[in-house]
Image: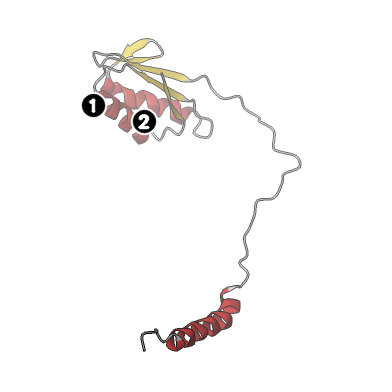
Amino acid sequence: MADINVTPLVDVMLVLLIIFIVTAPIMTYPIEVALPQRVINPPPQLREPPPPIDLRIDASGQVYWNNGPVSVTALQNMMENEVQRDPTNQPELRIEANQDAQYEVMAKVLAAAKNAHMQKIGFVQ
């Protein structure tokens, strides 16, 4: 006889079907999800954000704070002073780097911003 016996295959499939039918209702249980609710009256903006800080890095590695040259070592103190003025309403730090600038200078600027706890950092082209 050259035919394949499919009876064991059918038996296994029926057992798997029964197991699936029994376990499927157990796996469907409700999960509570706390969705955000719609706010009818949003809180008003009491304060206007401070003017942004324009930070520019040129090809030679010189850093400019609002078009005034500044050293990389003094940068963190200046950022900390800006953050301490109002920690909840910080100015946006806009960084514009020349494409020929070294990455090391950019890394120092970003490290200074992180250490000063600046929250709003953007990159400008």
The mark found on residue 19 in the picture is none
Q: Quadrant of the C terminus?
A: top left
Camera-nearest residue between 8 and 77: 8
58 up-or-down from 119: above or below: above
Instruction: Tell us which disc is closer to us: 1 or 2.
Output: 1
In this view, the residue farthest toward the front is 1
Image coordinates of residue 103 in percent, x first then y, are: 25, 26
Total of numbered circles in the picture? 2
Query: Does residue 106 appear left or right of residue 21 in this picture?
Result: left
Q: Earlier in the sequence, mark 1 or mark 2?
A: 1
32 up-or-down from 19: above or below: above
Image coordinates of residue 43 in percent, x first then y, are: 69, 37
Identify which amino acid the numbered label 2 is placed on: Ala
Q: Quadrant of the N terminus?
A: bottom left
Which residue is at a point 39% across and 29% down the rendered structure image? Answer: 80
Image coordinates of residue 100 in percent, x first then y, are: 26, 16
- Say which residue label 2 marks: 113
Identify which amino acid the numbered label 1 is placed on: Glu
Q: What element carries label 1?
A: helix
- Say which residue label 1 marks: 104
Where on the picture, by quarter, is residue 95?
top left
Query: Does residue 124 appear left or right of residue 72 in this picture?
Result: right
Camera-nearest residue between 24 and 31: 24
Disc 1 crowd rating (10 Å Cα; few below 14, some 14-19, many 20+) is: few
Which residue is at a point 41% across and 26% down the rendered structure image? Answer: 81
Query: Are discs 1 and 2 less than 8 Å apart at CB?
Result: no
In this view, the residue farthest toward the right is 40
Q: What is the CA distance from the residue labelled 1 to the residue labelled 2?
A: 14 Å
Colour theme? secondary structure
Where on the picture, by quarter, is residue 113?
top left
Q: What element carries label 2?
A: helix
Disc 2 crowd rating (10 Å Cα; few below 14, some 14-19, many 20+) is: many
